[in-house]
Image (tube, rainbow, N blue to C red):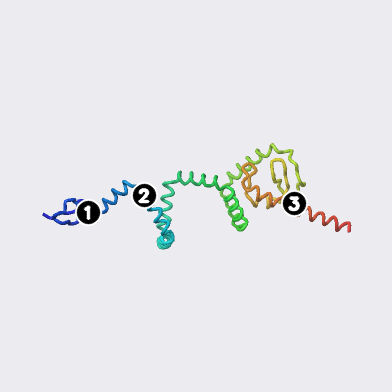
Amino acid sequence: MTKTCSVCGDSVGPRNRTGMCTKCRTRANAKKWNDANPERVKANKKSYREDHRDEANAAAKKWYEENTEQAKAQHKKWAKANLEKLTAEGKKYREGHREEINAATRKWAKANVEKVKAKNKSYREDNPDKIRELQRERRTYLSAYGDCERLNQWFVGSEGHHVDPDTIIHIPAQMHRSVWHSLKTGQGMEEINIHAFNWLNRVHAESLQTTLDAFG
């Protein structure tokens, strides 16, 4: 009677008493050892990855280039199934790297002014209700600061910018809207304040020079 492997079904020798071929028996023994030594298995895998990082990265890059659409589909499917995990990890990372993220965002925005303007314009056009709600919230929030110190006078085409809760600089509306910012949350405040103070200093310098020229 011909004996076969109980796992893969391949033929085995007539004297085989294990019920498995050599290949399946080796795999079974390896699995048994792995199950009994999880920490050593983990350490071995880590060591292997570290020793072959460049080869693994090159292979992964090559596979991605040859299977870009498949890779994107797989990532999209995985991200959808792990949305809560990704959201939690993203929040944790942002909280721990807030300064680095803000610095990188400001650097990118300065290098891509036209893209930022186009993106902001597109958002305003696509979300008029949200913009109106944000404006209402801003007016309500700022209503408590009616007695703020104003570092210059209002002029046609200007908007009052709160550099802090107690201080206002009137700057050109276009400049004021060039950087998305929020006094309440602090988002974008450093960047817009730099623009505001630079603009005010430049105006003061030009005004002084005009006066000096007038009086010779």
| Crowdedness near tag 1: few (<14), some (14–19) or many (≥20) residues, C-alpha within 10 Å | few
Q: Position of residue 41 (x, y in %)?
A: 36, 50
**Decide: marks 1, 2 in contact (CB < 8 A)?**
no
Q: Amino acid at mark 3?
A: Leu
* Gap in angstroms between the C-alphas marked 1 and 2: 28 Å
User: Closer to the camera: disc 1 or disc 3?
Assistant: 1
Q: Which residue is tagged 3?
A: 200
User: Closer to the camera: disc 3 or disc 2?
Assistant: 2
Quadrant where the C terminus sits is bottom right
Front-lying residue, 4 or 110:
4
**Splitting the image into 4 quarters, where does residue 2 fall?**
bottom left
**In the figure, is residue 166 to the left or right of 45?**
right
Q: Position of residue 174 (x, y in %)?
A: 68, 52
Q: Amino acid at mark 2?
A: Arg
| Crowdedness near tag 2: few (<14), some (14–19) or many (≥20) residues, C-alpha within 10 Å | few
Front-lying residue, 7 or 88:
7
Q: Position of residue 125 (x, y in %)?
A: 58, 50
Q: Earlier in the sequence, mark 3 or mark 2?
A: 2
User: In terms of secondary structure, where does tag 3 sit?
Assistant: helix
Q: Which residue is tagged 2?
A: 40
* Gap in angstroms between the C-alphas marked 3 and 2: 65 Å
Q: Earlier in the sequence, mark 1 or mark 2?
A: 1
